[in-house]
Amino acid sequence: MRYSLGFLATVLTGLNVPAWAQTREPAAIVLDTLAVRAERRAAFRIGQNEILLDSVLVQSRGQFLSDVLRRYTGIPNRAYGNGMLSALIIRGLPASRTAVLWHGFPINSSMLGSTDLNLIPISGLTDMAVQPGAGSSLFGSDAIAGSIALSARPEWKPGFKATAGATLGSFGLKTGQATAGYTNERQTVSLRTSVSLLDHANRFWFRNTSRFGQPRERQQDAGIRQKSVSQDVFIRFSKKIALTLSAWWNQSQRQLQAPISVRISDESQADETLSSLASVEFNHTGWKDKLSVYHQYSSIRYQKPSTQLNEFSSETRTIFRYEQDWRINRSESGFPNWQFQWGLEGAVQQARAESYQQTGRQNRFDVYVLATGHWTARLRSTVHLRQSTTTGFRAPFTPALGLEYDWRLLASLLTVKAHAARSYRVPTLNDRYWRPGGNLNLLPESGFSRELTVSQTFSHSTLKNWHLTAYRNTVQNWLDWVPGDTVSYWSVRNLPNVRAEGLEAGMQFAHKLGRLQLQSAAMLNYNRTVSLAAQGAGGRPPQLMYVPNYSGNWTIDLQYRSFVGGVQHTYTGRRFTTSDNSYALPGYWLADAYLRHQRKFARFQTEAIFRVNNVFNTTYQAIQDRAMPGRHYQFSLFFIYP
């Protein structure tokens, strides 16, 4: 699979204002309350930040997930075209250093090491959070830069509920989705089923900057078809025993968008994924046991008839996890809200590809201990200890320490957070087994990150909260595919250190004037990520390719009665496209706008959404020579019961 695996392995190295969450006291939200959920990632993430996006999912039906994340996080998005391969660059590190989790289990490809966000349908999700910062002590391999957590939670309100609708858009976009759920009167069984379909001709207009005069042309051979089904079953047998069964199937067929210098392309790629999860929980007084089994099958078929290429690859992953949680109350410890967890996790991974000389296999076993709690009413801490062993090598020991301290200042809460952690990333199966270029003797990456955050939350003010974070992350044994010195093919090597450091700042505003409510949020990111072994212009270490120094977003939303409208601005700065920083793509601003209206009837309600994307018709490229659409429109209509 020369293109879909070999090439990708090298390049992938309410109101809708998201809540920047604290683990203790989330910011007040006027129009759509967001709360930190009582899950492992929230309880044990003391000292780190989290961007909660649950409410954004509701009004983003029919959108690509990568576009949603770009609009509401300000994190740069690396996209190979409209609806094509896409991933976030969190804190200056490539997508393969970000763990994508479904119900707490990793879904990154064991072959490529990353997840294509545009293959994940929004309709099957109720919870979404972006968590910048090292998380290997919580989630294992890949979480060097951060994590993206996706899940669906039960709705325990008795009765039947359903949502169905469709979206029509420019350039031949058609989507449809339906979600239905049921909870019995005893609130012991909750069911949720979601189906989504997408058909997109994707024949958008763009300015061809590679041709004289930059003529306006229409994109050819970039169509997308996708279908997805998800099913969640939640059963409470008693107050002490609960069962969760979840499954998600996704199939996608894409014509691979060619560079703008190529008029016609016959390359296509078909992706299929089936994920399933079974989890049983036993609750006792003060402690609980949880046993989970996760299985994933994924396949890719790459075709190029002009060269008679028809290559197929597949991979399977099975994870067994046992966890035990317990709490110690004040009478036993003298301190409130202490929570502990220890767990065992085993994973079996296997992959087959025509470019592998043998079946790729990798087994992993992890043991971890987590503790979090209060030393005083103001001081909180968390400690993580994790050790992983993987076929062929032993991963680094990954401890983490987080602290938070609060000060009450008049009608505000000032919080200082500090976090330090080790992290790691094991080589992918492509890194080890791809021929030519793979290497069975690679070392795992080992990172050390530090971050410090100051934030303030106000109780009675138009300014609801602000935060400022400084971070540094150094990664040893960096894995990268580089051209051979004496051979014609690329190969993977462990390179010396890569260092990522920067600042993150954000704030939220909310104000109410009679029936008019206003809410706004802004985030700004500065990052410098350099390879310490290389030398760029002026003798300085060069910035990693496609990592901007500056990025950010600004959103503003207005609500008047049943109408909600808003604008989302995003900025992506200059990005170097060569390893020596000799050439760069210019930065660009994007603005998207929407208007949403809800109307209630006796037994149901309707929701209409009109969206204008790229309002100012900006010509830009996220990846060199890959066209992106100008101004385009979408209209969605949904029926909601009850």
Image (spheres, rainbow, N blue to C red):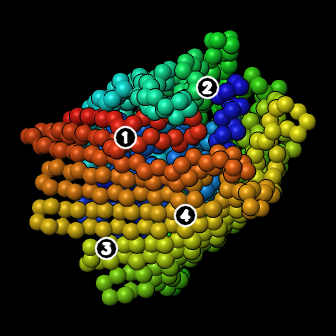
User: Where, by quadrant of the figure, is residue 429 drawn?
Assistant: top right
Q: Earlier in the sequence, mark 3 or mark 1?
A: 3
Q: Which mark is residue 463?
A: 3
Q: Quadrant of the N terminus?
A: top right
Q: Earlier in the sequence, mark 4 or mark 3?
A: 3
Label 4 crowd bin: few (<14), some (14–19), many (20+), radius 10 Å: some
Question: Residue 256 placed where, x, y %?
Answer: 55, 25
Query: What residue type is disc 2 on?
Result: Ile
Can you say which quadrant of the picture contains the C terminus?
top left
Dot 3, crowdedness within 10 Å: few (<14), some or many (≥20)?
some
Q: What's the CA distance linking mark 2 and mark 4?
A: 36 Å
Q: Nearer the viewer, mark 4 or mark 3?
A: 4
What separation in Å lies between label 4 and label 3 (alpha carbons)?
23 Å
Gap between marks 1 and 4 measured at Cα? 26 Å
**Pair 1/4: label in front:** 1
Judge the density around disc 1: few (<14), some (14-19), many (≥20) Cα neighbours within 10 Å: some
| Disc ID at residue 526 | 4
Q: Disc 2 vs disc 4: Cβ atoms closer than 8 Å? A: no
* Secondary structure category for the residue under label 4: strand
Q: Which residue is denoted by mark 1 in the rendering?
A: 617
Residue corresponding to mark 2: 300
Nearest-to-viewer mark from 2 and 4: 4
Mark 1 belongs to which amino acid? Asn
Task: Provide the secondary structure element on which disc 3 rests.
Answer: strand
